[in-house]
């Protein structure tokens, strides 16, 4: 399951956001599992009319560590996360003074970025120092391996010294395997979450656009976490009036969850079997065998081929039978690279 870790400075409201993501249900512990909002799944349910619909799911964690105090080993919730959601305070609340004495989300975002870049730089430099200490004591294949590692780390150090996030460097797969051995936080994708109040609701779209300039089209989202949490606790009949009173648009939390999924580098494929329609997350670039193994290891082990139709083609056809009649279903082999939105039936034998 994809895991997103919420990180923020003290007073950023990340725990309020964590609880709001639970839509009113109190999380148990510091892990919250949520369904991925998926309009394609809803459209497919209208075509297949299954008894059971299972969406993809994400896990959000509220780790026992805050920005401004990263020390020593990272908690597993951060070290093992697929994505870091950086919760940045953009709300005013006299009852919760800002540690810096004033609210400035762009300053706090810059501080967060600097802290995480420096965290990675220290790790890289320490490892390079150990390699230098070991260099004269080894030879042959071991020295060659150290040389390859040193070259990757030197490239990482150069990027970090220039303030570049490692996610943006474009390492090869082999280089990524080297970096995977370290708890590097700028290697992970980030989602920037501006935690706003009612004053900034009308500016949410502009804030997201500005974040996107630096972090990409799905790089940020503005959410009024306190208001969203209060809304979740209201009876359904009162929620529309609450939204109207504060000018609170619908879908902010859904947008956060969806962008967290997208930023994690995953795509969705769909299966329909035994009256269950299900969405499956898989890493972008995965082949058909990897996708089959996501559903069941036997499918990967005994993979024969995959019968594939894309969501858009299936919706236009209106049914699997009509898609087949129109020649829209394809038989693909084990090396087929999945496209986001593929609807697949795996043919296998064990």
Image (tube, helix red, strand yellow):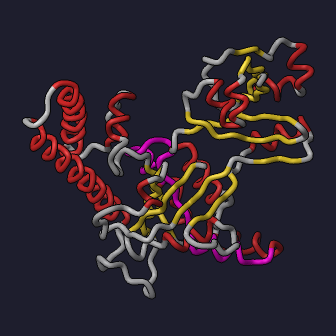
Left or right? Give the position of 164 relative to 282. Answer: left
- Is 258 one of the magenta-colored residues? no
Residue 161: x percent and y percent?
A: 18, 45
Q: Give residue 128's quadrant in the image.
A: top left
Left or right? Give the position of 153 relative to 106. Answer: left
Q: How many marks?
A: 0
Viewer-side residue, 280 vs 241: 280
Q: What residue is drawn where x is 62% and y is 29%?
A: 290
* Outermost residue, left side: 136
Residue 241: x percent and y percent?
A: 75, 73
Q: What residue is drawn where x is 62% and y is 53%?
A: 58
Q: Give residue 245's quadrant in the image.
A: bottom right
Residue 167: x percent and y percent?
A: 37, 40
Q: Is residue 130 above or below residue 66?
A: above
Viewer-side residue, 87 vs 93: 87
Q: Magenta segment, which residues? A: 208-235
């Amino acid at each position: 399951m994809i895991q997103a870790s919420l990180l923020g400075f003290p007073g950023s409201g990340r725990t309020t956001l964590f609880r709001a993501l639970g839509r009113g249900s109190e999380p148990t512990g510091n892990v919250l599992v949520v369904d991925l909002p998926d309009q394609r799944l809803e459209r497919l349910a209208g075509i297949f009319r299954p008894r059971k619909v299972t969406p993809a799911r994400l896990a959000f964690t509220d780790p026992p560590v805050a920005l401004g105090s990263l020390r020593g080993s990272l908690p597993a919730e951060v070290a093992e996360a697929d994505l870091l959601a950086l919760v940045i305070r953009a709300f005013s609340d006299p009852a919760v003074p800002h540690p810096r004495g004033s609210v400035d989300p762009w300053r706090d975002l810059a501080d967060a970025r600097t802290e995480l870049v420096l965290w990675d730089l220290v790790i890289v430099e320490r490892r390079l120092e150990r390699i230098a200490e070991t260099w004269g004591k080894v030879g042959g294949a071991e020295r060659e391996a150290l040389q390859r590692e040193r070259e990757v780390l030197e490239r990482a150090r150069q990027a970090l010294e220039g303030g570049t996030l490692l996610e943006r460097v474009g390492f090869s797969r082999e280089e990524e395997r080297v970096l995977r051995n370290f708890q590097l936080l700028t290697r992970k994708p980030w989602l920037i979450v501006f935690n706003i109040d009612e004053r900034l609701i009308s500016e949410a779209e502009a804030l997201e656009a500005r974040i996107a300039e630096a972090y990409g089209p799905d790089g940020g989202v503005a959410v009024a976490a306190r208001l969203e949490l209060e809304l979740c606790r209201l009876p359904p009949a009162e929620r529309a009036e609450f939204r109207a009173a504060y000018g609170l648009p619908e879908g902010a939390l859904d947008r956060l969850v969806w962008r967290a999924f997208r930023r994690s580098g995953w795509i969705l494929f769909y299966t329909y079997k035994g009256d269950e329609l299900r969405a499956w997350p898989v890493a972008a670039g995965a082949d058909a065998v990897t996708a089959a193994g996501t559903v069941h290891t036997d499918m990967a082990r005994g993979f024969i081929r995959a019968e594939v139709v894309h969501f858009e083609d299936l919706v236009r056809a209106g049914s699997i039978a009509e898609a087949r009649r129109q020649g829209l279903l394809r038989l693909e082999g084990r090396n087929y690279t999945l496209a986001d939105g593929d609807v697949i039936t795996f043919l296998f034998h064990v």
